Image: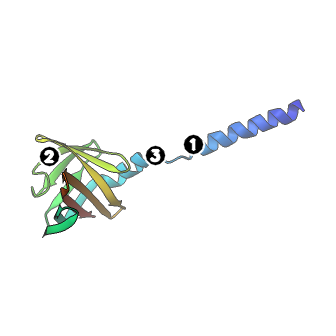
Amino acid sequence: MKQVKTLATLFLLTALTVFTGCKKDETETIEKWIVGTWELDRYVQQDFKDGVLVSESESTDQGKVKFSDDGTGDDIGGNFIGGDFEWSNTEHELTLITGGGTNIYDIEEYSDSNFVFSLTDPNGNDKAVERWYLSK
């Protein structure tokens, strides 16, 4: 009986080690693909009043954005942040720090080749949504 308990304990410890060791760190995975130079394909701003879209504007071909692996970045072309920035992220949020302050964006879509994030500015029943579409 003692041998069965020992084998069961060994099996349990081995299983825990294997499953724990294989767990992916989502933040690390995201950072690996964010790093690099992205084309800023589109910028869309939408304004809502009482939940109804009242205006929308779109700009295309807005330059490039570079995310470096040391957590810094550069707005190549000046149409995104207007210069250098610092960045970090979680699975669902991208944080950008500039001389003007800190903005936290919602990550809506990401893959090796596409990256979409947005910033919502609520104002009572009204809100403004800014959305950036990037590609590699």
Secondary structure, mark 3, is loop
Q: Amino acid under label 2?
A: Asp
Judging depth in this view, the residue of 130 and 9 nearest the camera is: 130
Q: Which quadrant holds residue 72?
A: top left
Please state if 27 lies on the left or on the right of 131 as rendered: right
* Crowd around label 2: few <14 · some 14–19 · many ≥20 (10 Å): some
- Could you say which disc has been placed on residue 25 in the image? 3
Write the residue at 27% across / 41% down.
Answer: 70
Please state if 46 lies on the left or on the right of 136 as rendered: left
Write the residue at 82% across / 33% down.
Answer: 5
Write the residue at 19% across / 68% down.
Answer: 53
Write the residue at 27% across / 57% down.
Answer: 117
Judging depth in this view, the residue of 129 and 20 nearest the camera is: 129
Q: Is residue 42 visible?
A: no
Q: Amino acid under label 1?
A: Gly
Mark 1 vs 3: CB contact within 8 A? no
Q: Which quadrant holds residue 132?
A: bottom left
Q: How far from the left and from the top, in percent, is residue 22? A: 56, 47
Which residue is labeled 1 in the image? Answer: 21
Secondary structure, mark 2, is strand
